[in-house]
Image (spheres, rainbow, N blue to C red):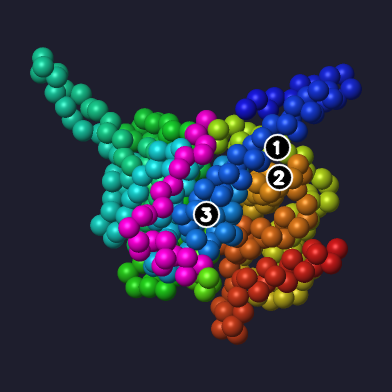
Amino acid sequence: MNATITQSSGGVSRSAEDTAVRDMERVAGLVQKAKDAVEQIIYGQGLVVEESLITLLAGGHVLLIGVPGLAKTKLVQTLGKVLGLDDKRVQFTPDLMPADIIGSEVLEEDAEGRRFFRFIQGPVFCQLLMADEINRASPRTQSALLQSMQEYHVSVAGQQHALPQPFHVLATQNPVEQEGTYPLPEAQLDRFLMQVDIHYPDFEAERQIILRTTGADQPVARQVLSSDDLLAAQKLVRQVPVGESVVTAILKLVRSGRPETTDIQEVKDRVAWGPGPRASQALMQATRARALLQGRLAPSVDDVIALAKPVLQHRMALNFSARADGHTVVDLINLLCKRIDAG
């Protein structure tokens, strides 16, 4: 997929525009086929599948929040198969060490008796890493993922080791059982482009689940894209044009969520800390990816509103008095969206 746009003396040439449009339409069709393939395995979670694919198209990481039994692990495995990615899974436990994730050096000896250190890669050296129940590991181990999630390499014994491309972390977390867990620090939460909440399926979806997954024939995921296709799609997402109205909506939404820059009294009274500039960047990329996934050539303000909750909810925190009064971050985000929607 070649999405190169050449410049002419008068700006972007007509032929280049036509090529870019064709590339976007082709990628949109492929990504939609990938979404359909995932939904053949994951029933009744269309929004979860869409938001996960949007995050991957935007080049980000996903934090999946849901009680046990909602197919979080199955979702990650299915995404890996459908997108043609090398996927690995790490079960986070209290005794997990950083070296168990990123790898370590071992002392070896050759046939002539010379000793040397050899780096053995950890499971982080993959294209799609599932960090299962990430909040059950110690902060020291959780921090081992920080560098890889942001810089796409790890450092061991002073040496940098590049991770495969693309590289995405899909972490899961149980919102109910919090005993023996370590809450993720704000710096690590901010590394996740989206927090995707997984809820119970509706009646018809659960009916399909029990009928299709308990019989002799089990549905099998099929590959639709390759890792090179995904990389090309991610590059193309960055070329999707964004109108000034969308940029303004993103800035107003994010800045109105900060007590220091808002004119909304509820935010000043209830928010301890608000979303930073990375939230604006995440919304910009996510709106582009959502438009492309849905077959549109440019995002709209509706995309900003639709993605506000998954992009902002883990980047804001209420103060103690607001939590004591029963207020939630989601309620506050809905208030901010209403202000944006009203113009």
User: Which is more N-terminal, label 3 or label 1?
Assistant: 1
What is the x, y in percent for residue 308? 67, 60
Residue 207 visible in the displayed image: yes
Element assignment for label 1: helix
Identify residue for label 3.
39
Q: Quadrant of residue 128?
A: top left
Q: Nearer the viewer, residue 151 or 340?
A: 340
Mark 2 and mark 1 in contact (Cβ < 8 Å)? Answer: yes
Residue shown at 33% from the left, 50% from the top:
90
CA gap, disc 1 and disc 3: 21 Å
Identify residue for label 2.
295
CA gap, disc 1 and disc 2: 7 Å
Give, as a single range, the part of the protein colored magenta.
205-228
Numbered circle sitting on residue 25: 1
Outermost residue on the right side: it is 10
What is the x, y in percent for residue 300? 78, 52
Element assignment for label 3: helix
The type of residue carrying mark 1 is Glu
User: Which is more N-terminal, label 2 or label 1?
Assistant: 1
Q: Is residue 121 left or right of residue 212?
A: left
CA gap, disc 3 and disc 2: 18 Å
